[in-house]
Amino acid sequence: MSDLIEQLRDIVGSNHVLNEQDVALRARHFWDSSPMQALALVKPANTEQVSAVLALCHSHKQAVVTHGGITGLVDGDKSTIEEIVLSLERMRNIETIDTAGKTMTVQAGCILQNVQQAASEQGLLYGLDLGARGSCTIGGNISTNAGGLSVLRYGMTREQILGLEVVLADGTVLNSMNTLLKNNAGYDLKQLFIGSEGTLGVVTRAVLRLRPNTPTVNTAILAFDRFEQVSQTLSHMSANLNSQLNAFEIIWNDFYRLSTNQKIKGAARAPLSDNYNAYAIVESQGANSEADQAAFMQALESAIEDEKIVDAVVAQSEKERDEIWTIRENVDLMLRHHPIFIYDISLPIVTMEAYLEKVKKQLGELWPNVTVYAYGHLADSNLHVSVAPQPENYVLNPVSGNTETEPLCEEHRQWYETCNKIMFEALSQIDGSVSAEHGIGLMKKQYLHYSRTQSEINTMGVLKKALDPNNILNPGKII
Ligand SMILES: Cc1cc2nc3c(=O)[nH]c(=O)nc-3n(C[C@H](O)[C@H](O)[C@H](O)COP(=O)(O)OP(=O)(O)OC[C@H]3O[C@@H](n4cnc5c(N)ncnc54)[C@H](O)[C@@H]3O)c2cc1C
């Protein structure tokens, strides 16, 4: 084994290979400060080094787990003491921006926020945005086919990718750096790797699709008495604002109350009373300040007149806009519950309310005080649901200010499995998905069959065997 580590050092330079002890000084995950585990962590600087590392690991049948920003939420980035971590932290270059063709070519370790910033400096926009923007990488976004806050308008990561460079398990560099919007010349191979969570290849470079910038932003938070009003308002805003509608995020009462609870360190300011059944953050973006604002206000006013919206606050400044978005992005406040079980599900909008009622009832029979926090990307039929079986077990003001997810004890692990069964069985009855945007990783693996047919799972196995015959890339993840 020391021979393999020596050869890795020869490829990337000895400063860029961390041994087991140095790896343990790193946090395992964005939300988990327990020590990272790995035989070694390797930091290649370019595609050629990634290729040499994988060729070596392939010949040694050595398992490799690729790391971007380690913000993934399904343990797809979890490594063991027998595995090598391949970190793309030295591959952060933005190589070119083509303003006429509206494309950007980047190395896969580039941080999402840096890509957004670079596009904006050229008067353009990158159509992906999510809460982990300051840490997650383009390679991680691609490998999880991340969704986020603007899917309604721009689609998921898949829709932002024109070309990819991928290193296959045996070190082959697959160059598919297409820059064209239209290219039907044979199989579109890049699609195989988007959303494959590092199991089929390592993404090393990408050609990103950029859009015209939308400097005008109008944001409001709305309140509703009934869920039916929320879905009616979504249809109304879509019809009135058309492609300018950028986000429509729902927040049910329990999460609104938690996120704006002034007793909790980090809580957001509450612009509306906390007595409403549900809230939505609605945002339009465009390029014509006066006309866009007038259209936004008119759409809101007509929805209020029709009694769809009960109350509303429109952001008057960037600060107020940030305050409104903080309510939605205060997800880490929920993680101060122990235990807390987190779900990212897709289901038809018309079934959402009945689904939540059903699972709340079943969970309440197990844990009388259970709190179910629900919020998410309503317009994409995507809800994030977090279940706190013991809401009283909550850290109000953690000394460190950091949120840390404690490992589950055996009893809580059993609770989690029971909770999964309740959540996913109810979901499979309405043809929902156990993973809307976070992926499968290790956490959702045993539940994949709820959302994929056996023939789909078998075909995934065939692809995995063909592309990674020695099973070295993220072994045991997804299937
Ligand atoms: C606060 C917060 C908010 C979030 N919000 C959203 C959201 O709104 N929508 C959403 O979809 N997700 C969201 N996520 C989760 C989301 O999946 C990640 O933030 C992001 O896409 C992962 O990028 P990463 O660089 O951190 O990848 P990592 O966590 O490092 O890796 C994720 C997976 O991709 C693989 N991988 C990473 N890089 C590569 C590569 N170059 N080649 C091949 N495989 C690779 C890993 O092996 C792993 O399986 C959120 C996470 C957090 C912490």
Image (cartoon, rainbow, N blue to C red):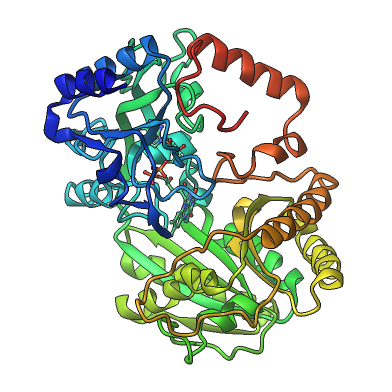
* Residue 68 rendering spot, x and y as whole percentages: 34, 41
- Picture quadrant where residue 310 is located: bottom right
On screen, residue 255 versus residue 82, left or right, reads right
Count of picture labels: 0
* Residue 39 visible (yes or no): yes
Q: 443 and 216: which one is in front?
A: 443
Q: 397 and 46: which one is in front?
A: 397
On screen, residue 122 versus residue 20, left or right, reads left
Q: Say above or below: 34 vs 391.
A: above
Quarter the C terminus occupies: top right
* Residue 304 rendering spot, x and y as whole percentages: 63, 80
Quarter the N terminus occupies: top left
- Picture quadrant where residue 433 is located: top right
* Residue 273 rendering spot, x and y as whole percentages: 58, 91
**Residue most extreme to the front:** 2
Which residue is drawn at the image coordinates 40% and 20% (left, top)? 62
Q: Quadrant of ligand 1?
A: top left
Q: 272 and 28: which one is in front?
A: 28
* Residue 104 visible (yes or no): no
Which residue is drawn at the image coordinates 49% and 13% (left, top)? 470
* Residue 405 rendering spot, x and y as whole percentages: 50, 63
- Picture quadrant where residue 11 is located: top left
